Image (cartoon, helix red, strand yellow):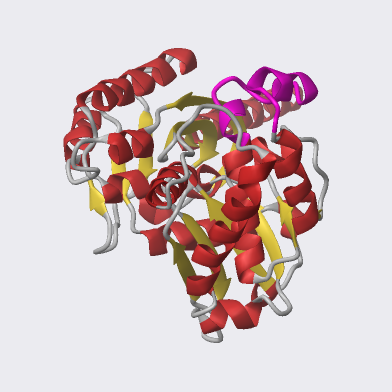
Amino acid sequence: MRIAFNFLFILSLSTQALANQNANQDENRNCLEKRYVFDIGSGSTKSKGYLVDICQNKLIKNLGEVNKAVRYQQCISSSIDKSSITEECLTNGLRALKAIEQEYGIDCGEHKCKGVATAWARNAKNSSELLNTFKLHDIHINLISQKEEGELGFKTALSDPYLKGVDPDKLLIWDIGGGSFQLSVQDEHDEIHTYEGPWGLFNFVHQLKEDFSLKGINLTKEGFFNKDELKEILEYTSHELGKDIQKDKLIVEKLKTAKVVGIGRIMYMGIKYELDLTNPISKEEIKDLIYEFAGMTVSEAQKKYPKLPDHFAPLIQQALILVYGVMDGAGINKLEIIESTLTDHLVLDQSFWHGEVTVAQQSF
């Protein structure tokens, strides 16, 4: 009798343990969510997929990354009124998002898909037309201000393991996109202050060629700038950028002691990774690379630097000129570049996923 009782008691405990295990598994399954985050920038549409534990707001694993080149800012700069997205770009923008969905093997109508739009959408008077089209395809995009873009960049960098233990007061985070750049620091009240740079890669080149044409200098040809052109181009870029940066007293003060850290795909993929650079990267290294590309063809550049992809190789010298111009104009002698993107912060940002947007944001 006692043996039978013990057996039944053990069986009941086992049954309860199994029930608890199944309940925990169900709870764990309910806590897991796949999220796909889009950073629709001025020169490309970036995306990352993540598996997230929403109960603990913790990243479980990355599900991959898909990026498509869509030159929104280039379209805007070359449009008739220089402030509209062309019909071709509208079509290409949606096509890029559908191609990204296809590569992930998902339908955003059945998965969490959300993102931000940056400088190009601020610059184009008809950006809402495209963002509303995205919404019809269940991809909800927040148009963020440049200040918010700077804040996101700073928070993104702080969460990177590379900067673990670094005092935020001793950091300046620098993000360059296709339509703007941001220099962000933390002020004495622990608020993030951002210098809102006027140029990104694409509108910088357009402005450069336009201003030089007024001087009778033709920079409209294809290919890299030559050595005879570069001296004046570098002086122009440093002067135009530096004169405004120097007016920002907090940025100037921070630069005396701050570690300058570059983030984003142009910085990390376009410059550090594809040109095989190591931290810290000096201003003189950047200048030497600019002159190294002078006289090269794009195919010669790709032969020397095989990681340069076809869509970015023709732009590499221009990207370096913009980086050098900011460094020289602001008085930055060296920087360190890390592999952090806005999507890495946004995936766990509760307010972003629960629709709590600020006044400066427009949710489409």
Is there any visible trace of residue 53 in the rendered image? yes
Q: Nearer the viewer, residue 102 or 254?
A: 254
Horizontal and vertical percent for residue 46? 48, 33
Q: Is residue 341 magenta?
A: no
- Residue depicted at 42% across the width and 13% down the height: 102
Horizontal and vertical percent for residue 178? 46, 43
Q: Is residue 312 magenta?
A: yes
Range drawn in magenta = 295-316
Seen in the image, is 265 located left or right of residue 357?
right
Vertical side of 99 occupied by 46: above or below:
below
Vertical side of 59 occupied by 87: above or below:
above
Horizontal and vertical percent for residue 121? 29, 45
Q: Nearer the viewer, residue 125 or 98?
A: 125
Vertical side of 63 occupied by 363: above or below:
below
- Residue depicted at 49% across the width and 44% down the height: 201
Seen in the image, is 303 located left or right of residue 114?
right
